[in-house]
Image (cartoon, rainbow, N blue to C red):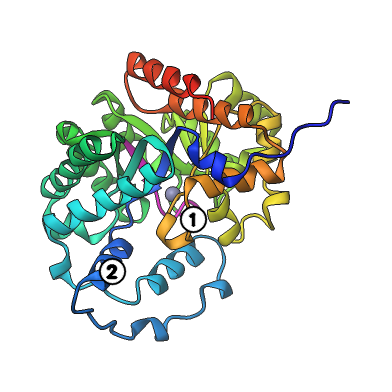
Amino acid sequence: MRKRPPAPSLASIRRLPKVELHVHLETSLRLRRLADRAPTPRGHDGESALIADPSKFTGYDRLRRLRYASRAGKIPDDLYTPENIEQITFDLLGEAHEQGVRYLEVRAGGRRGFALLGTRRMLAAMAQARVRAEEVFGVRAGFLMTIVRERGPDEAESRAREAIDCKDCGVVGVDLAGDEENYPPALFTRALGLARDGGLGITVHAGEFAGPASIWTAVYQAGAQRLGHGIRAVEDPELMAYLREHRITLEVCPSSNIRLGLSAGMGHHPVGALMAAGVPVTINSDDPVLLKTNLSRELHTVATAFSLTTGDLKALMDAAARAAFMPADQSKVLQRQLARVVP
Ligand SMILES: [Zn+2]
């Protein structure tokens, strides 16, 4: 058997042109960081000291507590200005550019910004950053409207309609997120159907905290073209075969899974078995500020754990370009751009 070459270094991975499909804007964390950069730092209100240690909790409950603890309490409403939203979106796109990302899809929608500013103002501010980032960095972006499960099917429908209305701001899809165990995808069939009929892509957080049944309903009933995480597909060979045959792409976020206790470590992460089964897989950073990671790091960790070559990493990027929510001709252009570059 021929020995595989060593996994590429972090520096060479950073130089590879990339596509990222699963990044949350995480408005509150970024606004806190923006506020802390200001000349007169705003004092934290000390609430974080009252929050129980997230590691004592499991699953989605841990994620919720981790986010709350990280943003050090409540963010003042006056930070939610269009200027600040534009700036944090621009920051995110700039950070992606530093990692060699050429195209990314940024999701937002679950946080207070939408309630305080209104959907159109929020997305218009993000769209300004999108235009500026393309001019300054050459990085392109699309936005996904996050629909939060806990807010129920009616609000989900309004969100889907708003997302369709804001296609001119760069909205390319919707993302169903939140408490997967208690709010299964089937509840949101109507909302996601509206989005699909409105020409938007559909991705569903599924197979993260709940098992294969959640993925089956996300695909069958909610029409998911992509799955946020989807790692528990590994428990069901028939499901893996289905995902492979129908080219339903997994947005795998390794550090996120490990931090939330869904995988014991990278050596045990299901992504190895999923790739081996031929399931379309992409690698993503999920929430880089909270998880203190970026796409290059995520790829490096996966490459090291599973002995991937540069060619394998380019195949992962190609899978991401194919699964991007963009017209087929644009996706082909992106695929060609990724293939051309030899690091
Ligand atoms: Zn996510």
Check disc 2: other Cα within 10 Å, few if <14, some if 14-19, many if 20+. Answer: many
Specify the label residue 119 is tagged with. none
Residue 112, quarter of picture: bottom left
Check disc 1: other Cα within 10 Å, few if <14, some if 14-19, many if 20+. Answer: some
Q: Is residue 332 left or right of residue 129?
A: right
Does the stretch in magenta take in 180? yes
What residue type is disc 2 on? Arg
Q: Position of residue 96 (x, y in %)?
A: 38, 45
Q: Is residue 96 left or right of residue 219?
A: left
Residue visible at 43% across and 65% down? Answer: 64
**Is the distance from the Cβ of mark 1 to the nearest ligand 1 atom less than 8 Å?**
no
Q: Is residue 39 left or right of residue 101?
A: left
Q: Secondary structure at mark 2?
A: helix
**Is residue 229 visible to us here?**
no
Q: Which of pointers 1 and 2 lies earlier in the amino acid sequence?
A: 2
On the rendered image, what quadrant is the C terminus found in? top right
Q: Secondary structure at mark 1?
A: loop
Specify the label residue 32 is tagged with. 2
Q: Position of residue 43 (x, y in %)?
A: 25, 83
**Is residue 334 visible to us here?**
yes
Specify the label residue 293 is tagged with. 1
Count all numbered tags in the image, as a single digit. 2
Residue visible at 13% across and 43% down? Answer: 124
* Segment tinted magenta in the rendering: 173-182
What residue type is disc 1 on? Thr
Vertical relation: 29 (above or below) 314: below
Q: Residue furthest top?
A: 329
- Alpha carbons under labels 1 and 2: distance apart: 18 Å
Q: Position of residue 169 (x, y in %)?
A: 17, 36
On the rendered image, what quadrant is the N terminus found in? top right
